[in-house]
Amino acid sequence: MNEVIFQERAKQIHRKGDAPFELACNKESLAGAVSQRACVFCGSRVVLYPIADAVHLVHGPIGCAAYTWDIRGALSSGPELHRLSFSTDLQERDVIFGGEKKLTQALHELIDRHHPNAAFVYSTCIVGIIGDDLEGICKKASQEKGIPVIPVMSEGFKGNKRAGYNAACKAMFRLVGTGDTTEISPHSINILGDFNLAGEIWIIREYFERMGIEVVANITGDGRVGDIARAHGAALNVVQCSGATMDLAKMMKEDYDIPFVRVSYFGIEDMAEALYKVAHFFKDDSEILHRAQQIVREELSTLYPQLQKYRQDLQGKKAAIYVGGAFKAFSLVKAFRLLGMEVVMVGSQTGTSEDYRELHEVTDEGTIIVDDSNPLELSAFLKEKDVDIFVGGVKERPIAYKLGLGFCDHNHERKEALEGFVGMLNFAKEVHATVMSPVWRFVPRREIRQ
Amino acid sequence: MLEATPKEIVDRKALRINPAKTCQPIGAMYAALGIHGCLPHSHGSQGCCAYHRSHLTRHYKEPIMAATSSFTEGSAVFGGGANLRQAFTTMYKLYNPDVIAINTTCLSETIGDDIPTLIRESRESGIIPEDKVVIHANTPSYVGTHIAGWSNMTKAMVTYLSTKTDTAKNQINLIPGYVEPSDTRHLKQMLKTLGVEAVVFPDTSEVVDTPQTGEFHMYPKGGTTVEALRTTGNSLATLALGPEASKAAAVELEKKCQVPYQLLDLPIGIAATDRFVQAVMEVTGVEPPESLVEDRGRLVDIMTDWQQYLYGKRVALSGDPDQLVPVTEFLISCGARPVYVITGTPSRYFETRCKEILQETVPEAIVKADTDLFYLHQLIKNEPVDLLISNVYGKYIARAEDIPLVRFGWPILDRVGHSYFPSVGYRGSMHLLCNIINTLLERKDRDDPDEVFELVL
Ligand code: SF4
Ligand code: SF4
């Protein structure tokens, strides 16, 4: 059976060392595939969801709202409105006669009760078909209620998750530029593309603040409507992740002439580089770079010795990576290397050809690189490469466990902060705990092997 | 997190807050997994399918396989026919399932794709190999809930597969309802103990609770086989457990193959399980063996030993209609007072039966279908309860109001056990009851001041 899989999908799989690098990606998933991919709505929802003082109203049938109710630990230090599930719960008559009246009414009921600072209204597939005038309704509600009511054009069928990121960015961009920027320091940034899973953005913010930099807006982890409104007052956008908020950074560059740098907070090298990149931007104040160096030095001096003991056990173990966005994959490859481990397979749901080219460069000979994979394929690779730990998301976890491998969720369901210097330690601990667990000894397949 | 919930209850017309239901296709997908060798197929955009798989995965902690038609803008305009044809080709090439069970989604329903015609055409043109089974159910989420999805897919098994021939079979059909694999497994065990041959469908045991072998199997060993499903037309009778989930299939089976059916509440609790056993006896003429009588005795023993801790306890319940009815009845038998019983699923059965059950002992009880957890929270804020029984989503309310919570129903995304320990039958009821009692006692120990905190309870 495997042969067929590889034939059909040959262009989306590459083994380093075989042939010149070439990988087809950003293709539509093949109809009929057990794809791990999600939809536009999903993309928008994960990006905007952490904005905690807004209401997020899903205009559609109940499912779309039910499955996105608080499934992601995007922490808030204050309001928690984002953790409630609001839906217009469209019924048959709404599908026939249109859902506009219901949406208007729902917005009124919602805003009157919860007094949010903004409302995001998500369009779902069905709304795209019945053609409700989301734009018009939101505009009217906004005028009547005196808060921004912003449509998110996230009909699921209009592309994949990446299109959803774009829709989310467009929605946020409507907020940008509406707030007062007078008090903002010239040494200021926005943090883009971090969702504060397990409190990660707090770690990152603290580093920047220790450097003497003002963080204007968290976009979107622990996010606030008011902060995003004044985000155009920041001097620099610091963007994490190859997909989610890049479009917003580009729009802000175009309209407000705010430059951006791309960073990653996973792993020691990338984390340090992120701080240095920002410090170099604020060249006018050499103290900033100085402080950045000091942070890195301090953090590493406590971190390295602690990592050693994990490294000892993990040396030579094999890891496989399959994540949503490719940016995470780069950092993970480096992080595993730091632990003395070998990455034998790496893939993503939504990587671009640029991403994969970069991945090809950072990986070792024989590594399998794959775009938009499926469970059969993944399990074949995992077995072939005799992997010890698999890093993936919710749908990958049980596959790893069934095969009897360790697993680390580097996605929505992570429970430990994995970003920052301390995140590297947490990552090492987590990888160590799952790889070294004695339970794998009872897995029949691996019992035989030993 | 729920501090914002106001006490004052206002009628909401357009807004659903914190739903106590989800959409049809996920129920259909779960039911389809109860057929052996089946690959569920979601005819719509890939998002729906990804969500349904993730959600089921979170509940069962098992790989959940399903394919999708991956609609694009083009399919939204021209219909999903081409996608479905492509999907068949892909599925047979890559995954070679014996059975494909198609569910629609809101999108394909709104566009109006005619699935039976599409299946027929694909068969005629040879895209679907001759020996392969394809069934379908229409599952628009803007009508009904996940329960309707399960019910529709279960009915489709009958419509497509049940056949009446001349050779009557000395067996019964058992439709277990939207239950856990542990429940189905236990029901099969009970029938075995009773010495009754049965086709149980759909049967998700050994599909979503498979043992760890170190291998990943796309098609696990469990599930009702197509051959068995075909013979349901020759059975003596059908027992349909839980009307919302199972009635449609039973009715269809009577219509199509003249197999008479009995509609029963899910056998949870003493009385409902008695009725189930009674029904099996009537239909087959068997007598319950000693071991079953003893199981019953043990359940009653727990009820009597611990009644003092349950008597008069105010309980709030949220979940699915078929489960809530017998659990409400069970609580009443134990002396507790189910004061609020709500479900997100519209269900006349639920409202009528619950009211019937509660009428005498808890006349003030509020029973409401087609509502949400926000409403339940408001009720509790107005007059608190001693215990909440709910699926995972009850945990917010339990935390906000500091009420002990028994997780029961579907889904449970944060605890282990539901796949392995049943709540149906005498034994399942014992397990559920122990869980309820222990949860209450845990709370008592936590809250009791030192001077009354006791070793022996
Ligand atoms: S569109 Fe319909 S089928 Fe898809 S997730 Fe939403 S409610 Fe469910
Ligand atoms: S209906 Fe569309 S928007 Fe909703 S989950 Fe399905 S694909 Fe996504």
Image: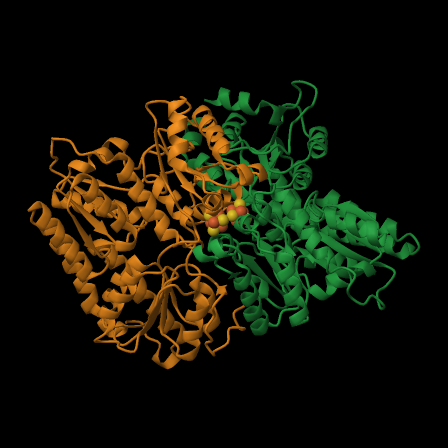
Q: Is residue B218 visible?
A: no
User: Looking at the colours in the rendered structure, which chain would you say is drawn in orange?
Assistant: B
Residue A18 picture location, percent across and down: 65, 18
Residue A243 picture location, percent across and down: 69, 44
Q: Name the residue nearer the viewer: B375 or B119.
A: B119
Say which quarter of the image contains residue B127. top left
User: What residue occupies the far top of the structure in this picture?
Assistant: A19
Q: Name the residue nearer the viewer: A446 or B396.
A: B396
Which residue is rendered at x = 52% and y = 70% of the image?
B2
Q: Is residue B32 visible?
A: yes
Asked which colour scheme the image uses, the reply is by chain
Relative horizontal placement of residue A311, taking residue B438 as reference (left or right): right
Relative horizontal placement of residue A129, taking residue B298 as reference (left or right): right
Say which quarter of the image contains residue A340. top right
Residue A351 picture location, percent across and down: 66, 36
Image: B101 above or below B273: above
How many dots with numbers? 0
Relative horizontal placement of residue B218, taking residue A212 as reference (left or right): left
Quarter of the image with the C terminus of chain B is: bottom left
User: Looking at the colours in the rendered structure, which chain would you say is drawn in green?
Assistant: A
Image: B212 above or below A108: above
Quarter of the image with the N terminus of chain B is: bottom right
User: What residue occupies the far front of the structure in this picture?
Assistant: A97
User: What residue occupies the far right of the structure in this picture?
Assistant: A284
Residue A108 picture location, percent across and down: 57, 70
Which residue is rendered at x = 49% and y = 45% of the image?
B107
Say which quarter of the image contains residue B227. top left
Which residue is rendered at x = 64% and y = 34% of the image?
A26
Q: Name the residue nearer the viewer: B40 or A51.
A: B40
Q: Name the residue nearer the viewer: A355 or B189.
A: A355
